[in-house]
Amino acid sequence: MNPRECDAILVPVDFSDVAGYAMDHAAAIAKIFGYRVFLLNVISKRVQGSAREKEVEKRLIKLAKSLISDHGLKVTHLIRAGDINKTIVEVAEKLRAAFVVMGVHGKKGITHLTGSYPYNVVCRSSVPVLVVKDKHHHVGFHNIVIPIDFSKKTTQKITQAIRFSRFFGAKIRVFGFLSSGNKAKIINKEALLKSVTDIFEENSVPVTTDLMVNPDYSWPEALLLFAESVKADLIMIVAERGNRIQDIFSQNYTEKILDKVDVPVLTIMPCDEDIDKEKSTSSQDIITPFVDPFGLIAGPGG
């Protein structure tokens, strides 16, 4: 793991069912690695010092005691006032958290994600964000699907993917998608997938590679179909820094995936040392891996 990360997992809590699912996942991860769980509730500045804040604190203390009793964890509760998106990101970065774990409703739930704080936090956070919709069904993540973007417009590293696969002791399932059946394109994409696979293998990470060619599917549809077929327990998306803020609220790939998928989704940003090496010419630099999470790259399945 990145040496700047500490043994903290931040769980934003609004006392909803999905927040409970997030605590469930966070507890399972924290129990494995001895991490401390921080439960955060963000209140408005108008509520500070009121009876409402005291009631929130009582509920947080009750949740913390439950996690301590049920799982033997170290748990801290926090109340902060301010904008919910900004505050979650700021607290996560101040803690140097290993993860933010968030419960989220999708179209199957109460609300669509656009404009919701879980989606906005995913877009803005430099800390890895694990988005969940249900309770965990086993301990840890062992079957991770990583979608590969074939755009030539950007470069990206797979260093974080290697770190997380080692962290969870997981098999990586590299997945590519093409809407075109052009043989030259297929050969080209298969070669790129092989290059990605080679890097994982060079780092002793168990890996499989699959390419789906189907003009009837969109990228999110193809990814979710594949994840279901291999019984994935995590989809990991590596994002780019410097995404245009005006674009993150559109119905793009990440939002579609978060809306429809039932398994957890982990969104991570490249670490600083990867950004500094952006212009290098190593084999990792010529690969454009992960599906563009903010929809900024046209035609990823082209």
Image: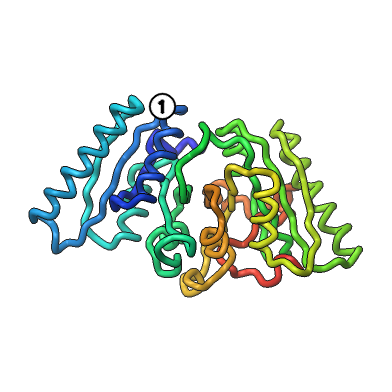
Question: Is residue 287 found left or right of 73 in the rendered image?
Answer: right
Q: In which quarter of the image is the C terminus?
A: bottom right
As helix, strand or loop, the secondary structure at mark 1 comes to loop
- Residue at 46%, 52% (x, y): give it: 126
- Residue at 40%, 42% (x, y): give it: 97
Residue 8 picture quarter: top left
Residue 297 horizontal/vertical position (percent): 64, 69
Q: Nearer the viewer, residue 91 or 175?
A: 175
Q: Which of 1 and 11 is in front in this view?
A: 11
Decide: few, some or many residues near mark 1? Use Cα within 10 Å; few <14, some 14-19, many ≥20. Answer: some
Q: Indicate whether 123 appears above or below 103.
A: below
Numbered circles on residues, count: 1
Residue 121 horizontal/vertical position (percent): 41, 58
Residue 194 horizontal/vertical position (percent): 81, 47
Residue 203 picture quarter: top right
- Residue at 73%, 38% (x, y): give it: 207
Q: What residue type is labelled 1?
A: Gly
Residue 159 seen by the camera: no
Residue 165 horizontal/vertical position (percent): 61, 37
Question: Is residue 177 found left or right of 130 in the rendered image?
Answer: right
Question: Is residue 256 found left or right of 151 in the rendered image?
Answer: left
Residue 267 seen by the camera: yes
Q: Mark 1 points at which residue?
A: 34
Question: Is residue 217 found left or right of 138 in the rendered image?
Answer: right
- Residue at 75%, 69% (x, y): give it: 216
